[in-house]
Image (cartoon, rainbow, N blue to C red):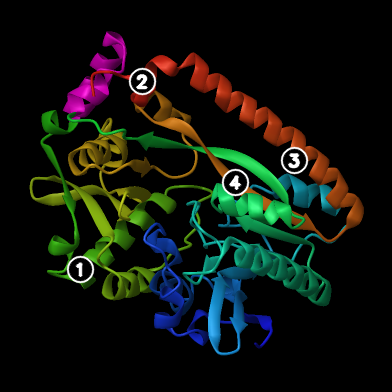
């Protein structure tokens, strides 16, 4: 039997789509689909010019593809949501090289999922051995290219622990997700809240109708009528947000949306807010078999509470109606807690080239993770009255 080999390729196109996607499992989200990654690269959004140089890991045994992992070389931290700015600044003060770094993850996408795609049928032992080989090969690449850090961003809890088994240091963070335990109606969900909070939420939800605004979700059957038109609309809405922000980043261009809508329209959704027949706001979402992912929002006209309705309430209602298990509303946003979202752990795993920096950050990360575990546990205990799975009126 031939030995396993690990290599790094400089474009997703180096691996045929059908070979990469054959490694997808039913629980994988659309962001690790070859077509999504190809749209990012081939549109120029994830490219050396934008500090995303493809460096995807490939594990083979003879001619058999055993595993792949989307990866990139980066000379900054824009768009990877690693939240390592302080680490990089500390390294710079100590005159320790930090960039470039090797990132296993999805550009501009803080969504958790498998970061190593294994071929089906591999045993747990095989997966451990392949992970060990990937970590070893990545560290060798770090040394060869003079990289300062290795990050595995937003893996599953299982894959994060697997990376930690092979020498990486885990980090815990959190996002706010709406978790649906099987509500039979929206009323069952809103019954969780106090009367005062419920009334405030209903006032916010009533605002669009009072403003003459209607909301609807366009899914594949609607979008396929004119994929190019809706791709342009998604981009226009996205740009309307980033262009208003001093720190806004134009990470995704129109070519990305056009290619994505053309090649992978099935999981895409647009929430559209219209007034007098004109689109005034909207949100670009992506759906998997059991989750909805809120990605980008934009408004062409400002209205009170419209953001909450387009980005939160409307999709919560859709998840309840469809039986969707989880709605991930994106990174950040403590305002989501009062509207039915709850903190949910996210994970990452890290290694650093400089021994002293690595030792200091390992100690820091261990303390930070302990604090975050405790904070989330405390929230769950004190807010248990709002936990959907404890409500007997589902």
Task: From the image, give the main secondary structure of the stretch colored magenta.
Answer: helix
Q: In the rendering, which numbered label is found on residue 229?
A: 1
Calculate the distance from the C-alpha at mark 4 to the C-alpha at mark 1: 37 Å
Q: Is mark 2 on a helix, strand or loop?
A: helix
**3 or 2: tag closer to the N-terminus:** 3
The residue closer to the viewer here, 277 or 192, is 192
Residue 209 placement: quadrant:
top left
Q: Estimate the x, y position of residue 125 in percent, counting from the top left.
A: 63, 63
Q: What element carries label 3?
A: helix
Asked whether, in this view, residue 182 is left or right of residue 245, the answer is left
- Looking at the rendering, the stretch of residues picked out in magenta corresponds to 186-207
Residue 341 placement: quadrant:
top left
Residue 81: in magenta span: no
Calculate the distance from the C-alpha at mark 4 to the C-alpha at mark 2: 26 Å
Give the crowd class for mark 1: few <14, some 14-19, many >=20 residues within 10 Å.
Answer: few
Query: Which residue is found at the position 45% from the left and 17% from the top?
Result: 383
Residue under label 3: 365
Asked whether, in this view, residue 290 is left or right of residue 365, the answer is left
Of the 4 image quadrants, the one containing the C terminus is: top left
Q: What element carries label 1?
A: helix
Q: Estimate the x, y position of residue 10 in percent, counting from the top left.
A: 60, 82
Q: Is residue 337 above or below residue 112?
A: above
**2 or 1: tag closer to the N-terminus:** 1
- Between tags 3 and 2, which lies in front? 2
């Amino acid at each position: 039997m031939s030995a396993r080999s690990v290599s790094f390729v400089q474009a997703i196109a180096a691996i045929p789509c059908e070979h990469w996607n054959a490694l997808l499992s039913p629980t994988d989200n659309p962001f690790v689909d070859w077509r999504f990654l190809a749209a990012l690269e081939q549109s120029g959004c994830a490219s050396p010019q934008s500090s995303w140089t493809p460096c995807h890991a490939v594990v083979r045994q003879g001619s058999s593809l055993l595993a792949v992992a989307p990866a990139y070389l980066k000379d900054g931290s824009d768009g990877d949501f690693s939240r390592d700015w302080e680490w990089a600044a500390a390294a710079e003060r100590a005159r320790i090289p930090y960039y470039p770094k090797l990132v296993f993850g999805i550009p501009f996408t803080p969504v958790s999922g498998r970061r190593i795609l294994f071929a089906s049928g591999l045993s747990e032992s095989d997966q451990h051995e392949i992970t060990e080989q990937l970590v070893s090969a990545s560290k060798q690449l770090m040394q060869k290219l003079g990289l300062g850090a290795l990050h595995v961003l937003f893996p599953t809890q299982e894959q994060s622990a697997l990376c930690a088994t092979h020498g990486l240091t885990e980090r815990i963070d959190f996002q706010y997700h709406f978790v649906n335990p099987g509500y039979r109606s929206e009323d069952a969900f809103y019954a969780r809240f106090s009367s005062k909070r419920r009334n405030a939420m209903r006032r916010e939800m009533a605002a669009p109708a009072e403003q003459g605004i209607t909301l609807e979700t366009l899914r594949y059957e609607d979008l396929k009528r004119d994929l190019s038109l809706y791709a342009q609309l998604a981009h226009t809405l996205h740009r309307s947000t980033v262009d208003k922000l001093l720190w806004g980043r134009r990470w995704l261009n129109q070519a990305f949306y056009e290619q994505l809508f053309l090649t992978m329209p099935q999981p895409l959704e647009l929430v559209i807010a219209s007034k007098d027949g004109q689109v005034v706001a909207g949100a670009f979402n992506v759906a998997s078999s059991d989750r909805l992912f809120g990605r980008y929002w934009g408004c062409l006209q400002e209205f009170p509470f419209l953001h909450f309705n387009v980005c939160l309430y409307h999709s919560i209602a859709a998840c309840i109606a469809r039986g969707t298990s989880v709605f991930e509303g994106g990174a950040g946003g403590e305002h989501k807690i009062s509207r039915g979202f709850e903190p949910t752990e996210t994970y990452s795993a890290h290694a650093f080239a400089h021994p002293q920096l690595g030792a200091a950050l390992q100690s820091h990360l261990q303390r930070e993770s302990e604090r975050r575990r405790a904070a989330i546990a405390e929230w769950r205990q004190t807010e248990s009255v709002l936990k959907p799975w404890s409500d007997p009126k589902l």
